[in-house]
Image: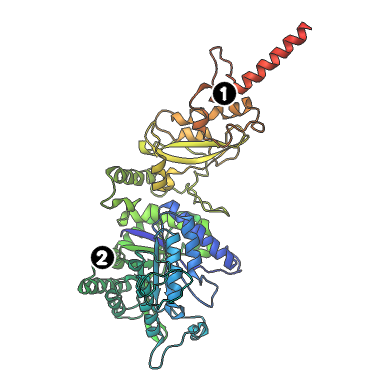
Amino acid sequence: MKKIGFLSFGHWSDSPGSQVRSGSDALLQSIELAVAAEELGADGAYFRVHHFARQLASPFPLLAAAGAKTRTIELGTGVIDMRYENPLYMAEDAAAADLIAGGRLQLGISRGSPEQVIEGYKYFGYVPQEDSSDAEMARKHADVFLEVIGGSGFAQPNPRPMFPNPPGLLPIEPQSPGLRDRIWWGAGSRATAEWTAQQGMNLMSSTLLTEDTGVGFHKLQAEQIQRFRDAWAAAGHSREPRVSVSRSIFALIDDRDRAYFGRGGIQDDQVGVIDNTVARFGRSYADEPDKLIEQLREDEAIAAADTLLLTVPNQLGVEYNAHVIEAILTHVAPELGWRWLSRYSCSSATPLMRFISIVLDEGRQHDGRHDKSRSAPRARRDRAVGSELHRDPPQPQPLPALLLRRTALRGDGRTGRAVRTIPHGPGEMVPPLRRRLRHPAVRLPVRGDEHGDADRPGVAGPADLRAFHSAPRCPVLAGTDELAAGHRHRGGGRGDHRHRHRPLRAQFAGRRRDRPHAPDRAGRPRLGVRQHRIEARTTAGARSRRAT
């Protein structure tokens, strides 16, 4: 298993207990959850698409917005019902969203799932031809979509165009290179998986299969995956395909988990009927992390796939769903072969990147695998942020040298605000590395009052930051206590804009005049150049008055 992401159904309702009460809530919280998942180190954020229901229905505005808010996480769908789609218009939307996201879209498409209405695609203007089924219509739409996103021209140009045309037939615009290789087909049977391989699409296998052979769901799904890989090899495609499976997995870490899922998941597969077809549904998992690991090791489909999608209960809110994802990434996934920063395991990764991946993974599990005092990531209205400190007063914890935290504290003239940390060795400054890692283990929110100290329990101040250092005091933190003194000598900040919005390191480094807090040889606070001039004018005025 190389990648782990989440799959959200995007439900909303005004029922008691739901934290997603409108379509606006569903869309905005989906974006926030994608941001939070990226902060936690997850690899993918995927969204279901359903029409005529209180669920996410138009994926491309959502994917474009999430792409603009994130940097590294994959963004996808699971799946878009091609019976409802105009393939040309969809190709334009998909290419535009992929360009905004920087080539991170992973689009799952398919014939679709059972609907809320009877033959809903007809209301969108699409009717199967005579002697043809809706499934065949979906595949025809997919064929056109795959052809046009590949860049082939098909439209006859106007001989007198408004703007000059390139020679030949015209393709849809814009084009997003590589998008054709990132299209998945949601297959519900072994035969469909083989057809998917022949078309050169990746395989997306869900939590149900529209066939039942009497064997366990995960065994049947593993067979489906193997037949897909065999068909892919027989087709002679040059690239390596990807395969994803979806599971409902919940690690019982704290009281909330036990209250929601403490009765355990569905222990056995279920067999039912969908659209007059027998279908087998996979089980769900909910248990303590150690037991969960043993159960998931027996799942042959998870072992055969390279991507695992965690279905999340989105109506419980961003904070809890981020907690669910973090619990799996921290306590379960590493034991199943997934590691933090798996994107750096490729051949292009430097030895330093691989070493950092190992050290961060060890640092995450340093204080125990089932630490219940760790709080879940919190979600703000504007965006979701990384993990907070323990809600209880933080205790000194020896951490690996590479995880020593550098803090850049910014002042707005009166209030100390700051708050991000960057992995470094003693004395090193590596901000570019922090932007690449995007890891919660190196993010430490801090709020301060005008003296730079925390005024509420559960929020770290400078003293708490130093408690997290196992090495000698970090040189960048040395000036934190002098922040208030610096502001006082500058007159409170309202009349002096020279130091406003500058990092602490920049304020207290360099020439002597930029260090108003530094004492002189007599032990008195050293005033800045501007204050010396004011004092000189005041002294001169006093002397002249005494002389007269």
Residue 548, position as x, y percentages in the image: 79, 7
Residue drawn at 27 percent across, 44 percent down: 351
Which residue corresponds to the image point at 26% horizontal and 65% vertical from the top-left? 240
Give the percent coordinates (x, y) of residue 283: 38, 70
Amino acid tagged 1: Pro
Tell which of 173 and 524 is nearer to you.
173
Residue 433 lies left or right of residue 68; in this view the side is left
Instruction: In this rendered view, identify the residue nearer to me: 336 or 424.
Output: 424
Disc 2, SS: loop
Decide if residue 17 is on the left or right side of residue 78.
right
* Quarter that holds the N terminus: bottom left
Q: Secondary structure at mark 1?
A: loop
Distance from disc 2 to disc 1, alpha carbons, whole Å, reads: 61 Å
Residue 546 vs residue 156: left or right?
A: right
**How does the figure colour the protein chain or chains?**
rainbow
Q: Position of residue 3 (x, y in %)?
A: 34, 59
* Residue 332 quadrant: bottom left
